Amino acid sequence: MPKFIVHFVHFHTDFRRAELEALSRLEGVAVECDEQTGGDDSPFLVVEVASAEAAARLVRRGILVRSIAEYWGSGATYDEVFAEVRRRPERWAEHAQRSFRFTVEAFGRTLTQAEKVAVIESFSFLGLEGPIRMHGAETEFLVCEEHGDPPVRNGPKRVWFGRVVGRGSRHLIDRFDVKKRRYLGNTTMDAELSLIMANQALARPGALVYDPFVGTGSFLLTCAHFGAHTVGSDIDGRQIRGTAGFRRGVDGLQANLAQYQLAGRVVGTAVFDICHHPWRPGPLFDAIVTDPPYGVRAGAKRLGRREGSAPRPGRSPDCYPPTVPYEMSDVIRDLLDFATDKLVVGGRLVYWLPTVADEYEPADVPQHPALRLVANSEQPFGGWSRRLITMEKTAQAAGSAADSAAPAHRNFRDRYFAGFERKDPTY
């Protein structure tokens, strides 16, 4: 199969391959990766895809993909690149009369304008006779110097050259930028990560996606943008409705639906505890996408009474029921059990798992016999990390989630505010 160069952005590096795998599933494009490329220290991954059209389709929803280029050559020096390009003269002859442009970039250093011009002129042997167009060119060539992170001395580690055939959808980060959003909460998820999660969940037209800790509805918006119908719930309805319940006007989640014109794809929201939900038994959702509360910016609660407490005499039946703290490991265990029952076979659970960095082990990720771990991507914050966990339902099965004896997310809130100073055996 033809080879292509995937040009990633160079952050959230642990998420890039997981998103590419999800894009492959979404678009039905088979991909073979060159494992000698695309490490955490490089934004370039060489892949084999059936055609340029399939390559463009593969990355068109990509959030961490800048572009994909038909592979024409690479090497430690420009001479090595030129030699490889010259082996296929029929390929560049095809573009000789078309309008064109060159994009010259470097990873690990900044090229001057004079250096870029010199690079472009070094490819004069291609014999391009068409007009140069900076916008709307029929053919775009990409030249990338990879200097490394940190950069190496005495020139680039590798030079990449190819013809751009497709781009990702990084413009959506600006569209859903939380700074431009009409309604926010203290737990509103970053737009870039929300979009990545929508891809991980395989959000698509015809799918039904659910967020059981919906908050201000970030995941409802991004999944709906990709065509899915979405629904959400939360134990605290104040975040969903904002102040709309107390004054006139559009507020809360409804303000965001109006802003992005997505009201037709958001089925609705409800207020209830996931442990006491009204959903009918059996499979219902194609994906569950959520950020469970772990007590840093918002505390986790569930319905219940503290030990030894009793109902107040004469209290109205219309009052809010009492709640109790909801420990993080219990939240995740219940979430996996819920997903096992409510996901269709092949459906995905995508959620954030906070962990104490120094104590995390892969075995800490809760498992369920009916759920297969697809991806585990880390976003580090120093003493702790949060991990984007993607699981796929493989069978309709009973049983409960298995948890290790002392996972690195147990009693996370207490550990966070204690500064991760110690590891208590009771944790």
Image (cartoon, rainbow, N blue to C red):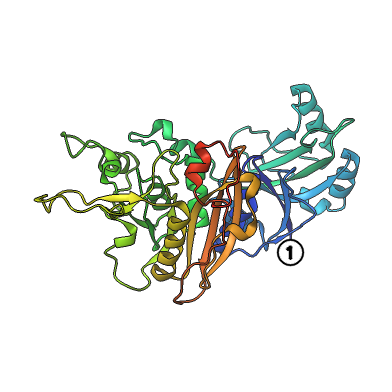
Quadrant of residue 338 within the rendered picture: bottom left
Q: Amino acid at mark 1?
A: Met
| Residue 32 point in image, percent of width and height | 71, 62
* Near-viewer residue (232 or 309): 309
Quadrant of residue 144 within the rendered picture: top right
| Residue 42 point in image, percent of width and height | 74, 43
**Residue drawn at 51 percent across, 72 percent down:** 370
* Near-viewer residue (290 or 155): 290
| Residue 139 point in image, percent of width and height | 67, 43
**Residue drawn at 77 percent across, 27 percent down:** 117
Asked whether residue 94 appears in the rendered view, the answer is: no
Asked whether residue 175 appears in the rendered view, the answer is: yes
Instruction: Find disc 1 in the rendering and name its residue.
Output: 1
- In which quadrant is the N terminus drawn? bottom right
Residue lying furthest left in this view? Answer: 314
**Above or below 356: residue 338:** below
* Near-viewer residue (377 or 275): 275
Q: Secondary structure at mark 1?
A: loop
Is 240 on the left-hand or right-hand side of 228?
Answer: left
